[in-house]
Image: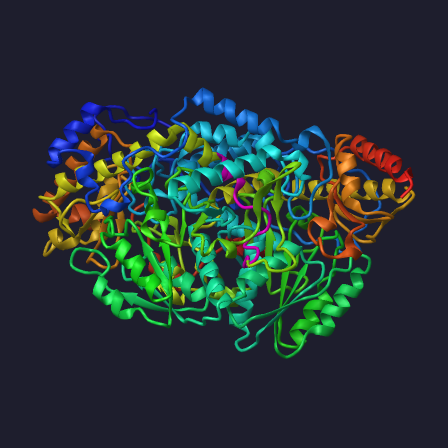
Amino acid sequence: MRYLPHNETDRRAMLSAIGAKSIDDLFRDVPPAARLDALLDLPLHKSEMEVDRLFRDYARQNVPAAEHAFFVGCGAYRHHVPATVDHLIQRGEFLTAYTPYQPEIAQGTLQYLFEFQTQVANLLGCDVANASLYDGSTACGEAILMARRITRGRKRAILAGGLHSHYGDVAQTMTRFGDEDVVRLAPSPDDAQGDMDRLIAAIDDNTSCVVVQTPDMFGHLHDLGPIAEAAHAKGALLVAVVTEVVSLGAVRSPGEMGADIVVAEGQSIGNSLNFGGPYLGLFATRAKFVRQMPGRLVGETVDADGQRGFVLTLSTREQHIRREKATSNICTNSGLCSLAFTIHMTLLGEEGLRKLALLNHRQATRLKAALSGIKGVKVLNSQFFNEVSVRLDRPAAPVVEALAGRKILAGVPASRLYPDRDDLANILILATTETVSDGDIAALSDALADIMQAEL
Amino acid sequence: MSMNRTGRPTQSGPNSSNNAVPFETTSGHRGLHLVEPLIFEIGDARHSGVDLEDVGDFDHALGGLEREDRMGLPGLSEPETVRHYTRLSQKNYGIDSGFFPLGSCTMKHNPRINEKVARLPGLADIHPLQPESTVQGALAVMRDLAHWLTTLTGMPSVALSPKAGAHGELCGIMAIRSALEARGDARKVILVPESAHGTNPATAAFCGYQVKAIPANDDGRVDLAALKAALGPDVAGIMLTNPNTCGLFERDIIEIADAVHEAGGFFYCDGANFNAIVGRVRPGDLGIDAMHINLHKTFSTPHGGGGPGSGPVVFSKALAPYAPIPFVEEGEEGLFLREHKAAEGDKSFGRLVAFHGQMGMYVRALAYMMSHGADGLRQVAEDAVLNANYLLHELASDMTPSFEGPCMHEALFDDRFLKDTGVSTLDFAKAMIDEGYHPMTMYFPLVVHGAMLIEPTETESKDTLDQFIASMRALAKAARADETDRFTGAPYFAPLKRLDETRAARQPILKWTAPQSQEAAE
């Protein structure tokens, strides 16, 4: 086996040094009834070449985004990631390091995390950010629990109808066994303002937080200012959710608009689609709430010679110190994904990010224009970033299947996320990033027009 | 920069007090020891390492929400970016750099074929919400990974989606609580041994349980009598790591499982140490009801400086119906994802995470399993246990093993051998850095004083272990020979000396801000 350095001579020498007759001696604490004498019914070892071939076979049965006109978004976005990013994160000193518990030999990880925290805080418009959580959906759940801790005694979180359905589901799961009451407003893609109005109307004295995604799951952009005002007037917090962080190169940050906690899915910057994971949860808040924050934090300090250095800090919030009294049970962050994020963000810089965001937005305006003329297709968004929703005159899922047959992955039918809601069956959500060309948009609108000509 | 190559002590690091170099360099660099500022100090908003087409004029549809502030996101050109992060990487110690015997963390070799196949466009460039007809290969990876995990553990079902070990614990305890609620049983307590990972009590508390600690007995295992005494109608279950965090197999585990079940509770096993027994013991034969598997430990997906991990959970027949969505299932038109609970009668506790979990880690772990096969995986456990016992035996006379008898995949020592030397476990660990090693896990588990938990893993050669043993013996002797400075001032040869963690926590600086003078000038 190519990963195991010992040969039989080594093993015999070591067993003999220990004074064991055989390896079985070392497993003698295992109860006899549980000892496996034979190999399990699984294939035997394979060469690297064979493994490579097997995975090419798996890969061949999938349609990579690059091979189709690609409009799928809804919480995960396909952007061009510079080759430099993936090259650098594969350096063994990054890839094969552990959590930086020995700071003297982990300054590489600690310094990039400090850079990452600063980038994230600035991008989201907040005072402080942590060193990342698993993904956007779990970050959202953690934000709800944190709001509960801050607004002691208040027990209700109100989720806007435009919050990604998976995020709502995860929030319900994470609060399921506490005394938190999660209220989910119904999705209303045709009435974005109504969603906000209903949210504001639902805030009461028992509300710990309201959770609003912008751009929301249907692509609508929301001005968080009035919601922050309404929430604060009742003593509640505003948790803002961003699933497409590239939008923040063009759109005012949630922090600036008054959000108290901002969570985001950071995948768009630096990370591939990866069929849903690993992704990168961004989490930022006001300085006064930092001790209620979950997850790792890196802070600046000095070494014994007065040199600047970085360490994990405020760990008295965390499980390995506080055990059952910790702010969260979370142990890891998304280290390597945060490195990819920070490298990509450094390559972009402020001007690059602005330009990238505007390119995304421009393609979306072109998509909207192209779709607006098609019979049986109604675009629902007036203010949006890089994603729009359309209401078709027929169920969206079969249309998406038909378009896939024409080498167009046309987006996400809302029925994939809300199978039980008949009122959403005709909704299709389409995203355009910088990777979507004008030709892709033309191909989509031609094919869609063609399909929509068929009688219902 | 001038370089003096004559008679210079080659081991001198930067800033070390015993550095014989008689001058400071102009640049602040010292040969390969390069000082690297923060990007905020070298980049600016007008530089970029990405070329993008001109956007041109168009009518925005942002509803007047255009971002106008300065974002504080400096850019660098591509060559500057490469150099910045390359230099940072060189301040890190990884498995690729050297021996990394961090107990409980399983720092084994990360095969590069796994990285290669995880980046195939057919596996990396696919979206979680693409039509299922276009991702049959991805669903096959999930199906096959599930098959390997259930076969290796002897458990009937697995939930793949948890994102890390602690997330897997949450998954397992939520399933237990759901199962109890389904039978109208409002139990309140989870038993957790004193030696447990901190995530165990934190998870139990997260799920609304009170945590009751179970003491260890003199041979480092759960005190069976204390456990039996603690069981009762209020106990929802136990969270037990096996092999445990002392590196020992819980000999009474079957009896423990029986006792917990008899009392009406469930048995959650923390599978962090499954690498010690894979292919030799199936947890399903021990009577457990749920166990998470850290793919980043046993199946060698890279730790990446602290994630991303992956923590699938295997379930017994009793708990399987409560497992979270999604699941891969086989239908007439091929594989599909069950992403939603059925309208009625579905006992799943719901969704734990957006999308389908850590696909990138599934691919790497499955590649690792296929490379080893049934035969190689059994050898993995045997060599891991052999290496740990070799260290335990060879270090027993100079250090103090905490317990008698063989260990499993890691060897636990305490600080009795440092008694009256003025050297603490922390000092000893820092001196190991000077010897070129990543220190072992310190002060964990909590059941012994000044714990030193050494996990060599199976991917280290006898030569590496012998050199490590020589260093450790020499350090132990030095400590007893009153060479205290070697320890209390350590590390001498790392990029930085010991860092002031108290200061970091007292006056937290968690983000870079422009120096006052600069701000005033703007």
Magenta highlight on residue A52? no
Q: How is the image coloured?
A: rainbow
Q: Is residue A326 above or below residue A352?
A: below
Q: Residue A227 location in percent, x, y?
A: 71, 68
Q: Quadrant of the N terminus of chain A?
A: top left
Residue at 46% from the left image edge and 42% from the top image edge: B37
Q: Residue B371 location in percent, x, y?
A: 41, 28
Q: Which of these two is toward me, B198 or B473?
A: B198
Q: Residue B13 location in percent, x, y?
A: 28, 37
Number of callouts:
0
Q: Residue B57 location in percent, x, y?
A: 83, 41
The residue positioned farthest toward the top in the image shown: A49
**From where the camera sits, is residue A103 visible?**
no
**Please, what is the dominant secondary structure of the magenta stretch?**
loop
Q: Which residues are magenta?
A: B348-363
Q: Left or right: B492 with respect to A141?
A: left
Residue B88: name its quadrant: top left
Q: Which of these two is toward me, B127 or A34?
A: A34
Q: Which of these two is toward me, B157 or B478?
A: B157
Q: Left or right: B147 with respect to B72?
A: left
Magenta highlight on residue B362? yes
Q: Is residue B276 above or below residue B207?
A: above
Q: Quadrant of the C terminus of chain A?
A: top right
**From where the camera sits, is residue A22 visible?**
yes
Q: Is residue A211 above or below residue A112?
A: below
Residue at 33% from the left image edge and 71% from the top image edge: B232
Residue B197: name its quadrant: bottom left
Q: Is residue A239 above or below residue B132?
A: below
Residue at 72% from the left image edge and 31% from the top image edge: A68
Residue at 51% from the left image edge and 71% from the top image edge: A149
